[in-house]
Image (spheres, rainbow, N blue to C red):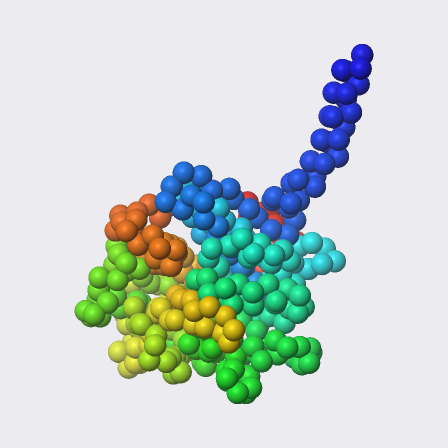
Amino acid sequence: MIINLQRALLASVIMHLLPLVLLAQNGETFLEFSGGEGPGKGKHIVLLAADDEYRSEESMPMLAKILSQTYGFKTTVLFAIEPETGHVVPNYQNNIPNLQALESADLMIMLIRFRELPDEQTAKIEEFVLSGKPIIALRTSTHPFAYQKNLDSRFAKWDWKSQVPGWERGFGQRVFGETWVAHHGVHGEEGTRALISGLAQNADHPILRGVRDIWGPSDVYTIKNLPESAQVLAYGQSTSGMNPDAPVNLEKSIMPIAWTIPYQLEGGKAGTAFVTTMGASLDFQSEDLRRLVINASFYLLGLSDQIQPDMNMDYVGDYAPTMFGFGTFRKGMKVSDFN
């Protein structure tokens, strides 16, 4: 009788705690995929999906599942969450909850754009950057912060247009070597063809191992402030059309689209970032763009010797990316929709 009562009590406690456990692990504000066997076992990657144009809410979970279920990394995906509804709302600029996940992260992969977060959230990103741990920055992450209201914030100097001495052009320039400049290609009409060959000095770089052909429908960005410390791994050329067979536009110059760069904030440790101006969810239909980013993850985590040119880049589950654009995200999305 007593034993049965104890079992019933235990069952009741479990039933009441279960929603909290699910919330903590795969709840309404983030996704978490446990790592398993593989070269990434024991390492944690946190991915930030918070841009309002290029559907990072679609691509970051896809990359997280490959990294976790194919290669053994523990991965956590954080989203832009509208507090009132708990929905994933990419154009909600002021909330990326659970950034404390960065405290245990070995690598941060970010695709964010023009965020103005509460200081207590931004401080978690600052702590990670000060630690000198590696970062992968995709597409609009060259201009991740824009301060319009909280101009007294100590992070206002991170604004993409900053003129604060030492922080000219903001976080993107200081950490990744560039900020937002312009569309070099015609946005929505021209795509990007990566030029991998021709960089003989970098042809054997581990990040390029097995990378042969990348095309994506997002256009080439203008790059004009890249410092000499950046090591360009790939250039991009505009294509006269938004399909893989479109010819390159020979009237336009080529631009860097992928590079590594050392970084160090005052008072922090030295680190390395990998940056690519590609990264729309549709771009990641290119197997070799997935390969480029996953190779970069291995490289930055000291696993270059594990990078093989024929590594499996297949999706885990379905992946049906949608067209980029402002306000075109699916409404009423819950984090569980991307699990």
Residue 25 is situated, as x and y percent measured from the top left of the image, at: 61, 44
Is 72 on the left-hand or right-hand side of 266? Answer: left
Place residue 298 in its image quadrant.
bottom left
Q: Nearer the viewer, residue 105 or 257?
A: 105
Q: Is residue 138 visible?
A: no
* Quadrant of image for the C terminus: top right
* Image coords of residue 129 (percent x, y): 51, 67
- Which residue is at 80% across, 12% downward? 1
Which one is nearer the viewer's eye here, 163 or 192?
163
Q: Residue at x 35, y 55 (%)?
A: 302
Which residue lies at the image location 26% right of the left edge and 56% below the top edge?
209
Q: Which image quadrant is residue 185 in? A: bottom left
Direction from residue 188 to residue 89 in the image, left or right: right
Residue 123 visible in rendering: yes
Q: Is residue 78 above or below residue 231?
A: above
Is residue 176 shown above or below 61? below
Question: How far across and how far down the image is residue 181, in percent?
Answer: 45, 81
Q: Is residue 258 left or right of residue 172?
A: left
User: Where's residue 9, x and y in %?
Assistant: 78, 25
Q: Residue at x 37, y 63 (%)?
A: 216
Seen from this angle, which residue lies furthest top?
1
In this view, the residue farthest toward the front is: 267
